[in-house]
Amino acid sequence: MGLVSYKKGQIVHKLGEEVQTLELVLQGRISTSFGSQSLLFSKGDLLGLSEKAGSFYTMTFVAEEDTTVYSYPYEDEESIVSLIRNNGKISPTLAIAKVRNTLNYYYSCDAYYEELSGEYNAVQNVLSEYPILSKRAGRDSIDFSSVSEFDAPELSESLKPWQLDAIEALRENEQKLMVTYSLSPAIAAGAVLELSILDQSITKSIGELMAYQSAFHQATAAFQTEMEVISVYLNSKKTDTEDAGEDNSDGMPLLENAIDTILAFTGISGNRLLEIRKFIEAYKALDNRHGTTDDERRLRKSLTDAFMEMYTKAFLRDQIDPKQTPDEVKMFLWFGFIDEELAGAKNTETMYRILHSYKPDPEGRVYSIYEWLTMVYRGIKQPSKDEFGNDFEGSLREAVTHGDITEAEMAKRLKNPEDRARFEIENMFRLGNRMTFGRITTYQPFFDAENTGMSLEKIFLSHERVNAVIDRIKGIDKYLFRRERVYYDDTIGIKNLNYYVEVLPTMILFPNAGERAGLWQEIEGKRRDSSARMLLPIFMTENLDKALVSLCGEFRWEITKTEQGVHWNDLRDPSLTAEYADYIQYYRKNRDLDQQAKEKVKKQIARSAGNLRRIFTSDYVVYIYSESNGSPLLNKVSRRILFTYAPFSKKSRDKLKSIALYKESLNRFENKNGEAIHLWQNIIRKLEHQDQTVPPEFYEQVEFLES
């Protein structure tokens, strides 16, 4: 008891707490609410008079700002009288304040009743239209007779008419009555006590209405949910004939309510549909969409889960009949588009135009994620490995081993297009989309204009752009995508002849505006001569050339490790990874490095957290960008390793001939390369002299070596 202070937002009394005190507000404000109604208690108001001593609070009271009260014990009516008498000087003010509070309390109760009545009538009106609306939305009708049988709310007579008239008269004449209250604290105490008794009657009515509201909401919850779902479906159908088919002045159809169109197409229904929609609206309402508070992280996690669920369902339905898929859904599948407001009008238009002007890569090297998943679905391409290195068949075989499925089920799933697509979406797509987005802590997969401040037309990765950069890189690093094979043809006397073929990577564009390229797998399954799978965002917000050069460095490292197997770091079987691992491990003792170079390597290792692939990749970027143009930035050891295993093309080598620093490496390569050319030319001449048909691979090999 005594003086008590509360911080803003702190609970003063909680629903269900026993009533043991009365609070005189000295400073600040305290509020309580029921329905959409709220009551405020400020300086001079008494808190607790609406309840009987020893009963329980029917509402929660919260400090609206920093607040100070004086707390008095509340045991019975005499406690109220004692409080007024002990504060005789302000007893008139307390009486007048109580008149205002009681009147406001009654008005709030009456408004609450009207609110519930309106809610009841609204539900009944919609219920009468429900059969027509459900049919229009294409949904089966549900029996909601229990809703129509629910009674309307009733308001018990908390105040008799004469009592209300009397209180309103007291309110209108409070200045005159101030003199009367001043005559004796007993008069003020009597007024406060009588009004508190009326308050308790109002509290009883409010309690009954609150119980009704709870029962009504419980009884109508399923119907309310179904009507919200129907609303989404109706929005998606665009049945308003004034808007149907409406185009803007440039021929683009009017795209509205994209969220509803996409959600309806997925077939997600009920509470889950409404939950997802609320997640998206909550994200749109954020003041800072890149925030990292716990609530913001949880929201982004919910959005990511929703996106994966929606994407899987939308893609699988699209595959049934792609021609029937709405543009909004296609834009979702291609770009992660979900909402025209979130994307912005200009970006929405750009995505629509890209979608309708898109032409597949004739060389079959670059695919949108939609094209890729379609090929996986149709069995043209096999699903990628999962994050643990298991392919689709391997994961099913593991499930058989664990007893989760039978051999028969495995055979069935291997041929099932939906199972193939689900495996790819749940594994490569789920992680790849986050990887290519780049900003892991603020990742959410739906397209948001705030994630890019650039024109989408400028950062869209067409297959022409991607192929051009890859061609430039392999035009410098001539062996980048070459795989060694063995040629055998006993009919022409060729046995175990090693030669190189080009195996270009598959580039898959993910539906986001991201900043990173990633290597998912360097080969398909266990086939050493298969294409790597490289991942890119469909809208690249960072420098594409640099991202792809770095990606090619990662690929060079990983393909060598795969080819070398357990000997990847064994110098007894020399390779790029073995020599590079040895160089980094023993750089301090390397006599070819001066102290300055060693310090540089030390910092490089620290920046890469000791990760060999990252260290190598950083050197590879310098090698392609600078060393190939005659700008020697690498140390002698790393340059020698790279030039040995990633030799430049003839065009790049010719640039370096006049630079003494490269003379030794160039001579060593030219001698070795010249011997290889001479060997192949001799084989070709021999076959021609014998009138044997020369395999085209032999001519291609000479052309490659000379390039």
Image (tube, grey):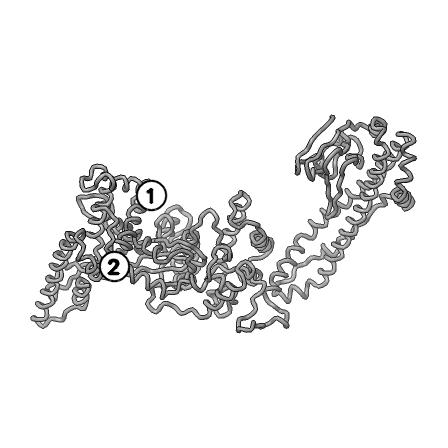
Q: Which of disc 1 and disc 2 is earlier in sequence?
A: 2
Mark 2 Cα-neighbour bin, 10 Å: few <14, some 14–19, many ≥20? many
* Residue 157 at x, y percent in the picture: 86, 45
State the residue in front, 291 or 400: 291
* Residue 361 at x, y percent in the picture: 36, 67
Examine the image and state in which quarter residue 196 appears. top right
State the residue in front, 156 or 60: 60
Mark 1 Cα-neighbour bin, 10 Å: few <14, some 14–19, many ≥20? some
Disc on res. 608: 1
**Residue type indicated by callout 1:** Ser
**Left or right of residue 599: residue 372:** right
State the residue in front, 167 or 257: 167
Q: Looking at the rendering, in which quadrant would you find the N terminus?
A: top right
Q: Is residue 424 above or below residue 697?
A: above
**Residue type indicated by callout 2:** Ile
In this view of the protein, can residue 25 be seen by the observer? Answer: yes
Circle 2 residue: 476
